[in-house]
Amino acid sequence: MDCQALCHRLDEKLDTATYAEVDPSANGLQVGSGEREIAHVAVAVDAAQETFRRAADAGADLLVAHHGIFWGGTERLTGQQYDRVETLLENDISLYVSHLPLDGHGTLGNAAGIANHLDLEGRAPFGNHGGEYVGQRGTLADPTSIEKLGSMLQPHLDTGGRGIQLLDFGPDTVIDVAIVTGSGVDFLGEAIDAGADVLITGEGKQHVYHEAREHGIHVVLGGHYATETFGVRAIADLVAGWGLDTTFVDCPTGL
């Protein structure tokens, strides 16, 4: 499949244009002419030297990453960005990026992946960001303890050998779950207002401890990287169904 056609299909599937006004990431094809043939797609959370080299070792023609190179209207290609682009060009790898679209997508997104593992019912968009949604909310089939919820999640989170963190300030049993992956603790207030028992996200901030304690809500901190592997792996499955070879480049940070 030629690169332009593949990127167009991904843009349509991920509804990339919808997030154009609210996402600082330059989503879509970030590096590449769009005219080459793509037979092998690698996917990774981060666009970085390690993932580029490992994608090259796998024989990939295109890398799909969640965190890309270009953010916020970059005007100069220097320093680290130059070095990364140089590595891509030297290895003849194109780069496609999907940031917020891959967080909020109803079936392919990071939050959707976590919701799948928890078998959440009655799912709805959650995490309003400039009028678009970057997470999901739903209910567990049966009330459960926060410790059991953590044990349900841990096997699916690539935390680099570190355990997840639980801020155990909510009810004895949880049923209403809100999810915003990565750096999603800023949506704690929305979770509180929605009556959620727990917010599942990636990394924390100091003030969240007290905010969660004072409002009686649990917070699960599963790691930024670990909570954001689901989307790119879903993309790998998607493009494999389109007849392309795929490789998941797993580079856990433990953060």
Image (cartoon, rainbow, N blue to C red):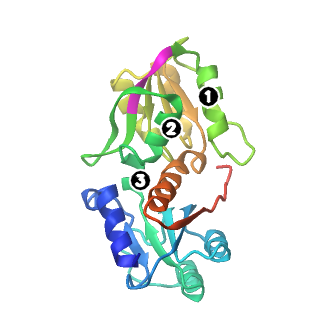
Mark 3 residue type: Leu
- Category of crowding for the residue at label 3, using alpha-carbon neighbours closer than 10 angstroms: few (below 14), some (14–19), many (at least 20): many
Task: Write down the residue under mark 1.
Answer: 152
Please tell me the numbered disc located at residue 114: 2
Helix, strand, or loop for circle 1? helix
Residue pictured at 39% horizontal, 44% vertical: 107
**Magenta part of the chain:** 137-142
Marks 1/2: CA distance? 10 Å
- Earlier in the chain: of badge 3 and badge 1, it is 3
Q: Main secondary structure of the magenta part?
A: strand
Looking at this rendering, what residue extends furthest in the top direction?
172
Mark 1 residue type: Met
Marks 3/1: CA distance? 23 Å
**Can you see residue 211?**
no
Quarter assignment of residue 220: top right
Residue 45 position within the rendered picture, expressed as x and y whole percent measured from the top left? 55, 59
In this view, the residue in front, 223 or 14, is: 14
Task: Write down the residue under mark 3.
Answer: 102
- Earlier in the chain: of badge 1 and badge 2, it is 2
Can you say whether 184 is above or below 46 in the image?
Answer: above
Mark 2 residue type: Ile
